[in-house]
């Protein structure tokens, strides 16, 4: 099988598992909505602040959901030696990485659409400049998924992986959080004009490219160690 076909085999496997278990819809999504609601209630006394901080709060909720999604993706393969079966399947390890990262990215993007609707509803924002917001969201999602998958396999197999993964991942994705927040602030007209978001979108794209490349090259050795 070629790389794209192997990639899709892994992606389809992870998405089928998620579709059957419905953990993202039943647990991760409600968690993200609760986070947004808590922030809304906490800042409700000052309605002037709430719209200004909405982009940052939105991406914090997405980041927390990403941690849960990545942990879930690798925890499923602990049972019955599923990870060993995947490793011995003959699939290209680069395709495994891309497939798992794509599955995480698809789940995250669906969550972002629903959480974005929640931000509009709870935080009194009017969405605009979709030509900026959509590329920013896509680039940030790819960056989070690639970094999460790379560090997820690094922590896989360890008893402390649930606590180790956030410690490893949070410092690494700080540039994504910064770039995505700044891009959304500009795109929504909260801090500058929408056109000022493009440098941040370019930074997000660079980060996504770097971590996708690193993951493609390093996933195989890390999987063997795990």
Image: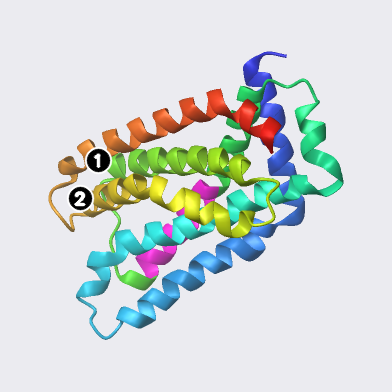
- Across and down, in percent, residue 112 comes to 46, 53
Over which residues does the magenta segment extend? 108-121
Q: CA distance from mark 2 to mark 1?
A: 9 Å
Q: Is residue 85 magenta?
A: no
Q: Is residue 93 above or below residue 186?
A: above
Q: Helix, strand, or loop for circle 2?
A: helix
Front residue (pair 190, 3): 3
Look at the picture and state if 219 lies above or below 45: above
Residue in the picture at 70% in, 41% down: 14
Which quarter of the figure is the C terminus placed in? top right
> In front: 30, or 117?
30
Question: Quadrant where the N terminus lies?
Answer: top right
Indicate which disc residue 186 carries: 2
Residue 95 lies in what quarter of the image? top right
26, 117: nearer the viewer: 26
Q: Quadrant of residue 48?
A: bottom left
Q: Is residue 111 visible?
A: no
Q: Position of residue 199 (x, y in %)?
A: 21, 36
Q: Is residue 117 magenta?
A: yes
198 in relation to 33, above or below: above
Instruction: Answer few, some or many: residues within 10 Å of disc 2's Cα (few below 14, many 20 plus, some between 14 and 19).
Output: many
Q: Are marks 2 and 1 in contact (CB under 8 Å)?
A: yes
Residue at the far right: name it. Answer: 80
Residue 94 visible in the snapshot: yes
Q: Mark 1 sits on what residue?
A: 200
Please state the horizontal and vertical placement of residue 142, each as a whole percent of the image. 46, 38
- Identity of the residue drawn at 13% across and 48% down: 193
């Amino acid at each position: 099988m070629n790389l794209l076909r192997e990639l899709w085999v892994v992606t389809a496997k992870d998405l089928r598992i998620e579709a059957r278990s419905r953990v993202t819809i039943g647990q991760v999504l409600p968690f993200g909505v609760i986070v947004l609601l808590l922030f809304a209630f906490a800042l409700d006394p000052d309605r002037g602040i709430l719209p200004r901080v909405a982009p940052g709060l939105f991406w914090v909720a997405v980041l927390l959901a990403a941690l849960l999604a990545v942990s879930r993706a690798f925890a499923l393969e602990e049972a019955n030696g599923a990870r060993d079966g995947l490793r011995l399947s003959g699939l290209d390890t680069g395709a495994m990485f891309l497939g798992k990262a794509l599955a995480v990215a698809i789940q995250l993007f669906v969550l972002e659409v629903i959480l974005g609707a929640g931000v509009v509803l709870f935080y009194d924002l009017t969405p605009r400049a979709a030509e900026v917001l959509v590329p920013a969201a896509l680039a940030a999602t790819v960056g989070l998924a690639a970094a999460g998958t790379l560090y997820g396999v690094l922590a896989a197999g360890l008893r402390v992986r649930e606590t180790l993964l956030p410690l490893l991942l949070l410092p690494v994705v700080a540039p994504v959080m910064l770039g995505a927040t700044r891009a959304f602030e500009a795109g929504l007209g909260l801090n500058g004009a929408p056109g000022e978001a493009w440098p941040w979108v370019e930074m997000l794209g660079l980060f996504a490219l770097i971590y996708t490349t690193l993951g493609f090259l390093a996933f195989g050795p890390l999987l063997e160690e795990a």
